[in-house]
Amino acid sequence: MCGIVGYIGSKEAYPILINGLKRLEYRGYDSAGIALLNGDINLYKTKGKVADLEAYVVGKNIKGTIGIGHTRWATHGEPNDVNAHPHFSESKNLAVIHNGIIENYDVIKEKLKNDGVHFRSNTDTEVLIQLIEYIYKHENVDLIKAIQLALGQVIGAYSIVILSKDNPNTIIAARKGSPLVVGIGKDEYFLASDASPIVEHTRDVVYINDEEIAIIRKGEELVLKTIKNQKKTPFIEKLEMDLNALEKEGYDHFMLKEIFEQPRSIRDSIRGRVNLKKDTITMSGIIDFEERFLNARRIIFTAAGTSWHAALVGEYIIEELVKIPVEVEYASEFRYRNPIIDDKDILIAISQSGETADTLAAMRLAKEKGALVYSICNVVGSTIARTSHAGSYTHAGPEIGVASTKAFTSQVTVIFLIALMLAQKKGKISNEKLRKLIIELEKIPSVVEEILQLNDQIKELARIFTYARNFLYLGRGYNFPVALEGALKLKEISYIHAEGYPAAEMKHGPIALIDKKMPVVVIAVDSLIYEKIVSNIQEIKARKGKVIAVVTKGDKTAAALADYVLEIPPTEEILSPLVSVIPLQLLSYHIAVMRDCEIDQPRNLAKSVTVE
Ligand code: F6R
């Protein structure tokens, strides 16, 4: 959460920073600000979005070739002008931007206040920069040492970038727990929370590791040190990112673009991993740890939000195909209990962003306990990908809309491929069945293309339900997690209360909610338990609920009972979550558009949740 950018070079920094903030706005949009070093530090910040900041700086001095910028997702202190970043130290000689949380800020603040330091904001970030200045002034050390000493005192997570009036050709950055990337150009450097603001300037990047400080001076080589002052050698990596993927390309919203990209993103998740001539699947991340996977006592998936829903689909798929017991854990719960996990277990962390703090903490815990930690991530080079022993990328391309869509289908695709590979290696699947499933998987992108043609029909349906106050989503088996995902999509972007339930659980409580005003989305595609779902629809109709049924083309029974029907092509049941989720994504999108909601940046949310 929070996006940070920085620039040092010979170009004007402002346009680079503003464009960078636009790329990072998905990380938070409570307030935005920039600071430019040009003799003095000129600092401009405002509540609201990057566009508000642009309006705010009109007519102001935005000159300077060194600067930092921030877009905020508020943690400490309400989202207003004063709490917006950057923050000055008391003398205004230092300015900082920060992503993360300083947990012991109150103790430090009290101490600094007692020593006469005055504060302007309610943020933990200001405490950090005031502490740095305090040490710099009182301990007779240079700025880098002061930063090292201050960071040694703080507890929590941060990536910070600092400007200093006394060090006019320098930017200093540091990280612990929150991501930070340095882009290396020709006599210029770029800093950002992720590579998206950097890729249009340079493809050479260095991912800063935890507890490292980057000292970046104009015209000099990048210097990396640890907080304890050990020198490190920067490891330069090449970015592979398609710039078009960062644009809306004619769509009204990134979310819609990303929904429509799914035939391509699913194909990219499969590409290069399947060999139909030899009937084999190769997930390169598994190869080095094949024995551990094959002898695993248990697989534990951990994740949050939509990625957790993909994990739940994974539980069904892996137990069915590989016959290894699977558990699915919310990372935020797993990390704070004392889970029984050891070197016979495998923890698979799923994350689109690869930065989710709880997921990362769960991985670290599992590692400490000796488990093999595998990751399924979308963002290449992300912290979760780098923290795991091995992993598979989903290759879905950048997902910018805050509501996750194509990440889900790519995650399920990758889990499915992992399951097929393990099932084959463990001798749990015949070659014929494997071949059949691969063929069916390869058809999925064109099935999704077909489903996307329902867009206009779904738009009309959305019109009918724009003003619903509540929604229920029901599914069973492989489609129970899809019901959860459908409900999550609706609530996060349209602010309509929605609940996902296993259809048969309805009679244990939620059925009390059903009346003629309650829309109930039922995923009733062909499956072994289709008849049971039909009974559940009957139970809803008996109580006058309005049923929107997602059914397989040609369906007669569920379709006859439902008030509204969305027909999707047939697929293997095990693959059905990849297709049944698409109409639900579109339904929530259109309802949210009709309610005039902020589609790509829903209130209170941020794309990358780097705080717990
Ligand atoms: C929902 C959504 C969130 C994320 C969750 C995990 O649309 O975007 O629920 O799925 O914050 O994020 P990642 O996958 O980046 O770990």
Image (cartoon, grey):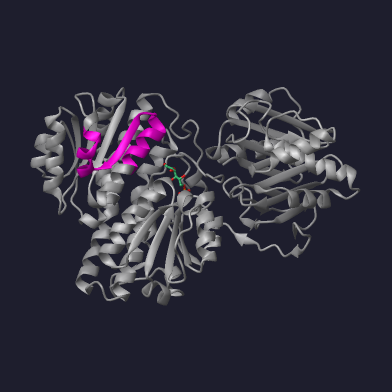
**Between 381 and 59, which is closer to the camera in this rendering?**
381
Place of residue 513 in the rendered image (x, y in percent of width and height, measured from the top left): 24, 29
Residue drawn 53% across the image and 60% down it: 365
User: In the image, which residues are magenta?
Assistant: 485-511
The mark tally for this picture is: 0
Place of residue 511 in the rendered image (x, y in percent of width and height, measured from the top left): 21, 34
**Between 64 and 222, which is closer to the camera in this rendering?**
222
**Between 200 and 71, which is closer to the camera in this rendering?**
71
Up-down: is 155 above or below 18? below
Q: Is residue 499 left or right of residue 517?
A: right
**Between 485 and 328, which is closer to the camera in this rendering?**
328
Up-down: is 322 above or below 76? below
Q: Is residue 453 left or right of residue 252?
A: left
Q: Is residue 144 left or right of residue 124?
A: right
Up-down: is 422 above or below 170? below
Q: Quadrant of residue 329?
A: bottom left
Place of residue 349 in the rendered image (x, y in percent of width and height, measured from the top left): 45, 58
Picture quadrant of ligand 1: top left
Outermost residue toward the right in this view: 140
Residue drawn 8% across the image and 41% down it: 557
Q: Quadrant of the C terminus?
A: top right
Magenta span contains residue 494: yes
Q: Quadrant of residue 412?
A: bottom left
Place of residue 74 in the rendered image (x, y in percent of width and height, measured from the top left): 59, 34
Residue 240 seen in the current view: no
